[in-house]
């Protein structure tokens, strides 16, 4: 009898996360923060002494999310912070690669995202208007990253991500710091939002 292929990963917290059938009880914020702080955006093709991590990107997206619409509950800020949460175990793929991999990647991402949201008290499905706002913040962040650290011209970034309102990003910076500093900042922001929700 053939032994089934292993589909779980051992986390530093000691949890065993089944990647094909994840459950909220096996998800810890420390694992997410650690994983995202060590996963590079843009496949590491960025300027600077440190890789620009998914955790740093997530902090920026959550900040932008708060600027581009009316005030919303802290739980929707948490949804923005965790929008790329699955990448702590499946990594960050640039969009062309995701398209080439096909629907299997999207299904895996969706299962993990649902488990993460449920773990932290969010609904399995985010309301459409919140999802749209997170996506807009994500695209603004991508534009900033593209033009400031990934070597894109403004015209290229405008074409791929859309030109952002300059007032929205005027005082925002792309932060490059060590993974441990980013991990601490991500964990602290998560704790702050959880306290606001409580």
Image (cartoon, rainbow, N blue to C red):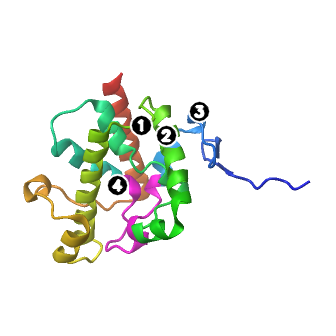
Circle count: 4
User: Residue 132 at what x, y percent from top left?
Assistant: 27, 46
| Vertical order, 113 against 168 (above or below) | above
Earlier sequence position, callout 4 versus callout 1: 4
- Disc 1 packing (10 Å; few <14; some 14–19; many ≥20): few
Give, as a single range, the part of the protein colored magenta.
Answer: 36-55
The answer to the question of whether label 1 and label 2 lie on touching residues, with beta carbons closer than 8 A, is yes
- Disc 2 packing (10 Å; few <14; some 14–19; many ≥20): many
Observer-side mark, 2 or 3, equals: 2
> With 128 as the anchor, is 41 left or right in this view?
right
Where does label 3 land, which residue? 25
User: Residue 126 at what x, y percent from top left?
Assistant: 37, 37
Earlier sequence position, callout 1 versus callout 2: 2
What is the CA distance from the residue labelled 4 to the residue labelled 1? Answer: 24 Å
Where does label 4 land, which residue? 56
- Residue 29 visible in the shown view: no
User: Residue 122 at what x, y percent from top left?
Assistant: 41, 31
What is the CA distance from the residue labelled 2 to the residue labelled 3? Answer: 12 Å
Earlier sequence position, callout 2 versus callout 3: 3
User: Residue 105 at what x, y percent from top left?
Assistant: 53, 58
Q: Residue at x 63, y 43 (%)?
A: 21
> Residue 114's mark?
2
């Amino acid at each position: 009898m053939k032994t089934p292929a292993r589909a779980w990963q051992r986390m530093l917290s000691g949890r065993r996360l089944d990647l094909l059938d994840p459950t909220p009880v096996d998800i810890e914020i420390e694992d997410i923060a650690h994983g995202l702080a060590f996963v590079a955006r843009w496949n590491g093709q960025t300027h600077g002494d440190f890789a620009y991590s998914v955790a740093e990107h997530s902090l920026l997206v959550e900040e932008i999310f708060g600027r581009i619409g009316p005030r919303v509950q802290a739980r929707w800020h948490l949804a923005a912070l965790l929008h790329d949460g699955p990448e702590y175990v499946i990594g960050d793929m640039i969009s062309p690669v995701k398209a080439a991999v096909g629907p299997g990647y999207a299904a895996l991402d969706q299962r993990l995202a649902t488990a993460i949201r449920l773990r932290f008290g969010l609904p399995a499905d985010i309301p459409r208007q919140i999802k749209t706002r997170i996506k807009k913040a994500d695209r603004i962040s991508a534009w900033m990253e593209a033009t400031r650290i990934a070597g894109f011209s403004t015209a290229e970034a405008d074409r791929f991500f859309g030109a952002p309102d300059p007032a929205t990003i005027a005082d925002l910076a792309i932060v490059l710091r060590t993974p441990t500093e980013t991990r601490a900042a991500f964990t602290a922001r998560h704790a702050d939002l959880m306290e606001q929700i409580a």
